[in-house]
Amino acid sequence: MKMIVVFEKGPRLRHIGHLDLMRAMQRALRRSGLPLCYSQGFNPHILLSFAAPLSVGMPGKREIMEVPIARDMAAEAFMDRLSAALPPDLPCLEVRPVDDRHPAPMALLSAAAYEAKMETVPEALPEAMGRFLAQKEIPALRKTKTGLKPCDLRPMIHELTLTGDTLSMTLALCEKATCKPELLLSSLFEFAALPRPRALITRTRLLGLRNGALCPLETL
Amino acid sequence: MENKRLERLLEEVQKPARYIGGEMNAVQKDWASVRSRFAFCFPDTYDIGMSHLGMKILYYLINGREDALCERVFMPGADMADRMREEGIPLFGLESRHALHEFDIVGFTLQYEMSYTNILEMLSLGRIEIFAKDRPEAAPLVVAGGPCAFNPEPLAPFIDAFMIGDGEDVMHELITVIRDGREQGLSRKDILRRLAGLEGVYVPALYDVSYHPDGTLKSFAPNDPAAPKTVRKRVVRDLSAAVYPESIPVPYTEIVHDRMVLEIMRGCTRGCRFCQAGMLYRPVRERSMERLLELADKLQQSTGYEEMSLSSLSSGDFTCLPELISALMERYREKRVSVSLPSMRIDNIVKQSLEETQQVKKSGLTLAPEAGTQRLRDVINKGVTEEDLIRSVTDAFECGWSSVKLYFMMGLPTETDEDLQGIGHLAKKVVDAYYALPKEKRSKAGVKVTASASVFVPKPFTPFQWAAQDTIAQVHEKQARLRQYLKIKCVNFNWHESELSMLEACISRGDRRMGGVIYAAWKRGCRLDSWMEHFRYEKWLSAFEDCRLTPDFYAYRERPYDELLPWQFIDAGVSQEYLKKENEKAKRGETTRDCRRGCNGCGLQGWGVCGWVKNPPLKDTDKSSAPLFD
């Protein structure tokens, strides 16, 4: 049996890297006393996998990990014990038990929703956003392991809206195509020829596909 | 504090996770609901300070009081310190982010002399007056403790009160006296007078010092009836009954020692003559097996750590070490918790335990023969023979180890070229011991020996407290020779910065005037001196000149026995007569037995505190060898 766990990485922890977060989760799981599964080998570690690493500097409202357990148990009991072992800035929000054969969250991931809360909103932004999205192609340079690579952002933007001082974005996030919110912001403000305001970007949801439509990953 | 400005700053600096707090088991108390607020300051960065056991003990102890809170404060990295100054953000407690100057008590732990400029930097960043005499009535009381407080004089101008010895009991008394004094509206001076009445507390402002024309100490005496002539160190009598943390903050970011620590014993009976800790932490006291297993369980459950280390000055001497290790292994096999022994000896008793340790996780192997020849090891009373060492590494190689670290000191009293050559011979013999094993019995990784030679620093309250340190020129020349002697296949040689060791020697045996040097060095920009990228030797030399003092006087001068030493007013238990006797025996190359095998009369026998060993006592027939592992 596996548990799909939805948790929050609070704003205080946004400077914690992915490896540090994994270690913190492993230690929380050890504290919980839950029946965990361990890897084989000389230095055994707790089996768990995350849907998608979160960039340093970014809080996550509904992050997802998968924890295989050695003995079947009810989701509520699992959640109670895990919650008691988690630090205040890393609360567990939801738990869903799934079959061992259920695909890993990482394999089902297709996009993510973000919110960028800006310190100032340039007046010309809404109009520029319209023109930005009306483009057939949005050429940009994407950072990869082997250097900067040209790419087209347009098909990777599922949604881009402005409400008050907050830009909401839904962007592709999977093995084949990933658009980081930072890249979208710089591309947008460069296109609009506007100075880029400081913004705190939060990942609000991880999304997968059901019948061709995006839906919360944890429901798949 | 304005979190927004801090948040913005954290985006710009390296390792921001050092500054966020909020770790599991960090204690978040309501600021307004307590009567005493204590800022526990570690004068080095988070990654170093969070690895320190003393801080964890006192953090737990103070937060255990309903009337008090304790927060952690670390030295920020250089980039963060600069940006905080520019942005006008004061140094803050990690838990509530209150500025340092808002606390009632600001306490520093003194673990290393070369962290002293960090204390001034932290006070400055925390908006507290650097000099104790300049602090207004409302300023926090700045206190300090830890091993380096046994010679408090170099920090006397900056610290209101020092705690000498074990901190567990005196900390409670200190907090209560300050709390009551504040609530009764007493003046700062009167609170300090009351503090001076506590055993183990030294208030420098209540003492006057004078010097001879040659710079040596002429007199040292109280200027106030509230101050005792002699300050006697505090000793925790029963370690099993003493407070020990059942939960400790678990950092998010990696720190130097990221594991649970079980202090199995305090003190050491071996009597190595260079070792300050061995003299300061006497007498030896063990925690009971029962208490240790109880603590281990609680720590494991509260932290979720995957590794536990046993800590003491000489864990191999713990009377029930094999039983303890077996019990811990048994308990944590299922939970995959490994047990490592950072400080131990390998012999036949422990070998079996090592095989068990290996089952879970193999930790590094470090041996400290300290000197290259038997003659010099006898001089320093390091009761280790070459046979011990070779047997130990052979055992370890058989258990699957392949890399060994060997720690040596250079510049020990009476050292000759033969002793330096001995370091090379010993390293070679360790390599040979590996190849002497049949192929199938040794690790496939191939042997790797790392020999490290630090520079000997004479310390107060050791038999070598009167000794001269080698000059920097001598050290450089010896290092060059050692490099030749250690050109051996499979052996690496590391050495330490001699400039840093020289300054450490100056401060560790410094008098009150050394405070001026520390201040001048800090004013010139020195901080984070133990970090090579920040260490500025020339600035330190200029600081000595600023104060018309010379490093030679403090580091290179052999003191006569009749000289009044700056730390002599402190009673550390070990008597000056004993230290002299030991120093004379050292000159003759005579060893002194481990005091568990019979009292050597070090001075503590009169305290009625020796022999509080809780676990079954060592049998006289047990001829086990010395601690090789530090």
Image: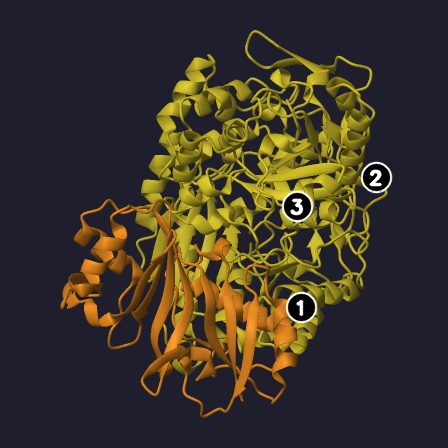
- Work out whether residue B375 can be spotted: no
Q: Quadrant of residue B535?
A: top left
Instruction: Evaluate if marks 1 and 2 touch, with contact meaning CB atoms under 8 Å apart.
Output: no
Query: Mark 2 falls within which chain?
Result: B
Task: Determine crowd level at label 3: few under 14, some 14-19, many 20+ residues with C-alpha closer than 10 A.
Answer: many
Helix, strand, or loop for circle 1?
A: helix
Q: Which residue is mark 1?
A: B301
In the image, residue B105 above or below residue A4: above
Task: For the C terminus of chain A, give its image quadrant.
Answer: bottom left
- Work out whether residue B120 can be spotted: yes
Q: Residue, x 60% and y 89% (percent of image)?
A: A72
Distance between the Cα atoms at labels 1 and 2? Answer: 38 Å
As drawn, the label of residue B271 is 3
User: Do the residues indicated by labels 3 and 2 lie within the same chain of the protein?
Assistant: yes
The amino acid marked with disc number 3 is Gly
Q: Position of residue A11 (x, y in %)?
A: 48, 55
Q: Which residue is mark 2?
A: B607
The chain letter corresponding to orange is: A
Q: Residue, x 31% and y 41% (percent of image)?
A: B480
Query: Mark 3 falls within which chain?
Result: B
What scheme was used to colour the molecule?
Answer: by chain
